[in-house]
Image (tube, rainbow, N blue to C red):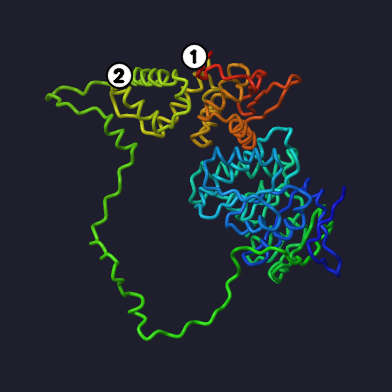
Amino acid sequence: MQLGIDMGEAQGGTAALLDLEELLATRLLVQGNSGSGKSHLLRRLLEQSAPHVQQCIIDPEGDFVTLADRFGHLVVEADRTEAELTRIAGRVRQHRVSVVLDLEGLDVEQQMRAAAAFLGGMFDADRDYWYPVLVVVDEAQLFAPAVAGEVSDEARKLSLGAMTNLMCRGRKRGLAGVIATQRLAKLAKNVAAEASNFLMGRTFLDIDMARAADLLGMDRRQSEMFRDLARGHFVALGPALSRRPLPVTIGSVETSARSTSPKLLPLPVAAEDPAGLIFAREPDEPRPPRRLPPRPAPVPTADLLARAARPARTAVLPGAAEPEIDAADRDATMDSVLREMLDDPDSAFRSVAVLYQDFLVRCRIRRVRGEALALPAFRRRLAVVRAGVGSDVVDSAGWQQALLLSQSLAEDVQGVFLVVAQASLSHAPCPSDAMLARAYGTHSTGRARRVLTYFEERGLIVLRTDHKGRRIAAFPDLGTQTAAGDPDAPDTAAPRSAAE
């Protein structure tokens, strides 16, 4: 069924119709500077399509919560745990309820984590609930940044992975991404490139105008037109809109945002004593406390633990040499300590800081001499020991190459990569999702699968399945591949319940 959504007026006075069914299959990218009418365009699209398709809006500023009163959207406050947001997203897909995820009041990193958890829950929904959903993400450059910013690498990776899944793999799951951004240059290219429909509004920077012209197939000289577009005027292109660049004017909307554009208001009459109004102290106002000198910066926990683990220096008699430290014995003892720690099945779900403290204490008990391992070196050694490399593999050139490849990855996923690499070098079956989740330190098999997808997008592995649905991971740089393994197999090293 072809359903045209009226977006306003096209050039020539005809109606600007958007094919909703085609949009669900091809996705949409909206670009425009602040004040160009982006949010107005999204509101028009949401209002016109609300009776026909389920909607999910990722709203960083709380502008779209007003849709609840007119169209019955459920407002989900994002000040919840990530696990709770994931569960709510699964129920949203199951019961086909249109929702607004309100991220207002959270800082940028919290917004990225909340959006990633919610989008991950919608993406991981059971196949029985893969109904069509229009997923609208406003200010998409916050959730899929082109470069690293002030947020942590973990939050950026989670958010970027969720946005990549939405735009690259969401179509088969019924998720149709509609993303809006102020600047194309700030949006990750692999996210923007998956959209087939475009609505380009006013922009002024040369790099953004050039990217907009490239996406619309226009000459670079024609890109100057984007500076002259009025508010609410866009250039449309795509199978759901027009086969040729088409100027459109967005129509009116029924609801309004809680925040509006600033308007000039007359200033009040000047007071006779403005200093008295501003600096006067109320009768019950406490006196300001005496300023104290600034406190010294706290010492990092890792440094404190390393100092505590450092052996005390003993007096050395004149002429006596310092006792020599056998590096091989020291490394073997530390590996033995790590294996003892990892023998506890619950250790996979403890934080690295807790494991590091336990490691230092155990090394002191074993009287391991020399400088204590720094936290980054501990993470690296833990990932190698957790991979469980056999003696026939540890000295091979393939394993050394795998170690080099893992250094290009974030520290928290190096262990997962080495576990799969070890299986390929040993020609063992590909680890199951449950085993990879334990190596990642999580109970979520969906996150483990997303880590494998992340490796594949980086070109480190190639995933395929055999005729029985078993997974095989090939490593182009190593020239090896794992044997076929069942991705749904249980984790044999997981802790068993009392009933078992």
Q: Nearer the viewer, residue 335 or 61?
A: 61
Circle 1 sits on which residue? 391
What element does badge 2 sit on? loop
Q: Position of residue 432 (x, y in %)?
A: 61, 22
Sequence-first disc among 1 and 2 = 2
Q: Is residue 269 left or right of residue 299?
A: right
Question: Is residue 109 depicted above or below 211 in this figure?
Answer: above
Image quarter of residue 337: top left
- The amino acid at mark 1 is Ser
Circle 2 sits on which residue? 366
- The amino acid at mark 2 is Arg
Question: Is residue 271 depicted above or below 128 in this figure?
Answer: below
Q: Is residue 205 left or right of residue 311?
A: right
Question: Is residue 314 depicted above or below 85 in this figure?
Answer: above
Circle number at residue 62: none
Other-residue count near label 1 (Cα within 10 Å), few / some / many at <14 / 14–19 / ≥20: few
Q: Nearer the viewer, mark 1 or mark 2?
A: 2
Q: Position of residue 274 (x, y in %)?
A: 37, 81
Q: Is residue 136 left or right of residue 340?
A: right
